[in-house]
């Protein structure tokens, strides 16, 4: 069944979203599309349900975002320029990421470290640069990195996750100083959200992640936000006049819409 577009749709707003098939990414994609915003979803797989519901608005590209050679090759093509062409306001949401490897330094696998740094840092930075170049003629350009509270607080067992998310925060701070025309950026922590990543955390042994019990308590006590709740706040902020006034933000500290 195709979902009709709302009367207030804004077809000249276009969004590129990585990791759009699960968790916060899927919720972001659905809510953007429901607003009438065209979405280019980039992930290892496709979202069949959303493709059926929004056939005129959703485009998808299958890409392993942890494979930097493939990412570089894809970005060198014309997909970004073609999709954003004609957009008066264009958005890039760097959402794809991984929490692995979890564990103290000596227990981390070199291959998992390389994949995490590729997926969490190199790919979003590459997308940001390519997006900025491809949309130079657009009226308004906004980039949001999906960050984490772990970017601003260190946690035992999360050295790679903390470091990679902190890299996104500092990238946003630096890009904000570029004063590029009509380009704003913010690295936003979405809060503690009930996603597959949270299930991974709760399934990790305490020898690798000493704070596991804390996250178990959050789940048990109903203190995790849903992906839909977090996505709603993220989109509200991304489309607001206050977006980009600061280079880092946390959805839990944003004013209610």
Image (cartoon, helix red, strand yellow):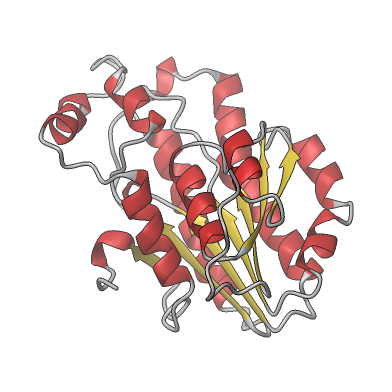
Q: Position of residue 81 (x, y in %)?
A: 83, 64
Answer above or below: position of 15 versus 204: below
- Front in this rendered view, residue 182 or 55: 55
Whether residue 189 appears in this view of the structure is: no
Q: Position of residue 83 (x, y in %)?
A: 79, 61
- Front in this rendered view, residue 10 or 80: 10
**With 239 as the anchor, is 51 left or right in this view?**
right
Residue sitting at x 22%, y 25%: 212
**With 153 as the anchor, is 184 left or right in this view?**
right
Answer above or below: position of 211 versus 7: above
- Image quadrant where residue 199 sits: top left
Q: Position of residue 70 (x, y in %)?
A: 80, 36
Q: As drawn, which residue projects farthest toward the right?
A: 77
Residue sitting at x 61%, y 29%: 114
Q: How many marks?
A: 0
The C terminus: image quadrant: bottom left
- Front in this rendered view, residue 83 or 143: 83
Q: Position of residue 60 (x, y in %)?
A: 72, 44
Residue sitting at x 41%, y 76%: 246
Whether residue 180 appears in this view of the structure is: yes
The N terminus: image quadrant: top right
- Image quadrant where residue 253 sits: bottom left
Residue sitting at x 62%, y 83%: 179
Answer above or below: position of 26 versus 179: above
């Amino acid at each position: 069944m195709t979902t009709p577009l709302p009367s207030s749709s804004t077809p000249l707003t276009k969004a590129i979203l990585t990791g759009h098939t699960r968790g916060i990414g899927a919720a972001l994609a659905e809510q953007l599309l429901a607003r009438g915003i065209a979405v280019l979803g980039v992930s290892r797989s496709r979202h069949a349900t959303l493709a059926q519901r929004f056939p005129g608005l959703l485009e998808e590209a299958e890409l392993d975002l942890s494979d930097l050679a493939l990412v570089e090759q894809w970005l060198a093509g014309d997909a970004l320029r073609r999709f954003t062409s004609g957009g008066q306001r264009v958005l890039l949401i760097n959402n794809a990421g991984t929490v692995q490897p979890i564990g103290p330094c000596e227990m981390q696998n070199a291959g998992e470290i390389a994949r995490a740094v590729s997926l969490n840092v190199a790919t979003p930075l590459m997308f940001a640069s390519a997006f900025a170049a491809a949309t130079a003629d657009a009226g308004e350009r906004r980039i949001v990195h999906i960050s984490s509270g772990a970017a601003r607080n260190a946690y035992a067992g999360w050295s790679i996750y903390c470091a990679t998310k902190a890299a996104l925060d500092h990238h946003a701070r630096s890009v904000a100083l570029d004063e590029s025309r009509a380009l704003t950026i913010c690295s936003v922590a979405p809060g503690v959200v009930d996603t597959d990543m949270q299930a991974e955390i709760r399934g990790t042994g305490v020898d690798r992640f000493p704070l596991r019990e804390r996250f178990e308590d959050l789940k048990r006590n109903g203190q995790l936000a849903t992906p839909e709740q977090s996505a709603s706040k993220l989109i509200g902020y991304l489309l607001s006049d206050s977006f980009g006034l600061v280079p880092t933000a946390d959805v839990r500290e944003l004013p209610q819409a």
